[in-house]
Image (cartoon, helix red, strand yellow):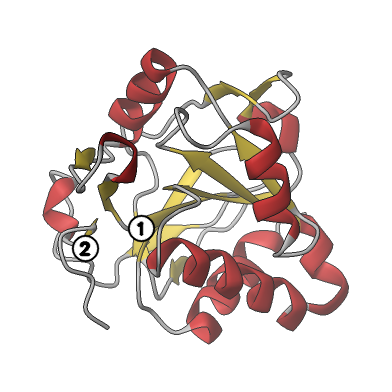
Amino acid sequence: MNLGRRTVLSCALLPGLAACEKLSGLMPGRSEATTFHATDITGAEFARRLELPDVDGKPRTLADWKGKVVVVFFGYTQCPDVCPATLAEMTQVRKSLGPKGADVETVFVTIDPERDTSEILKAYTANFGPGVTALRGTLEQTTAAAKEFKVFYAKAPGKTPGSYSMDHSAASFVFDPAGKVRLYVPYGGDPKNLAADIKLLAAAL
């Protein structure tokens, strides 16, 4: 897939991570090491908080989904490939987990609140079934959230002022049921591996 300028896939955006390799971490309540397919970022000093309104204007934080495995992804509705592919993958993962899929929440943070109105976000996320929450902040709130997650995004000018696209990093952040960030998942991985990782985290429920 040719992503052009629209998406940045490099793990180098996250200082201190070793090229998206497998790492071992300790599951809560377990003494043995657990190996994940995604990059284990347990104890990271970023992606610790998320405070943005949802599409109904209600303030949301990670604590709202405590008890669930939460997958956070930054994107925008006019993204032609990576964003819909990521959300579709999460739908596939939830289904593959059977009843446990109800314990997984996808949180989609728009990086384009100027065009992504609440109505557009509601219609967009509805395409991916239940278990998807869209967050839409002000430009300032969005900038602060992206900084906390070390997510890059920027406008790529189009032929007209309203036809711009967005360059952005393409990765998901997975939080365990206690609300702690655990995994960094680069775009383009095997959904079966992600499902296996989420199943391990959900085992703490």
Q: Rate crowding at label 1 as few (under 14), some (14 to 19) or many (20 or more) other CA atoms within 10 Å.
A: many
The residue depicted at 72 percent of the width and 44 percent of the height is: 122
The residue depicted at 73 percent of the width and 30 percent of the height is: 64
Residue 45: image location, x then y, percent: 31, 31
Compared to 79, does 85 lie above or below?
Answer: below
Q: CA distance from mark 1 to mark 2?
A: 7 Å
Residue 139: image location, x then y, percent: 39, 19
Q: Which residue is mark 2?
A: 9
Q: Which residue is mark 1?
A: 171
Q: Which of marks 2 and 1 precedes in the sequence?
A: 2
Position of 57 with respect to 175 (left or right) is: right
Do the numbered discs 1 and 2 sit on residues whose CB atoms are within 8 Å? yes
Q: Quadrant of residue 107?
A: top right
Quadrant holding the N terminus: bottom left
Q: Quadrant of residue 11?
A: bottom left
- Numbered label attached to residue 83: none
Q: Is residue 118 visible?
A: yes
Q: Quadrant of residue 51?
A: top right
Secondary structure under the numbered disc 1 in the rendered image: strand
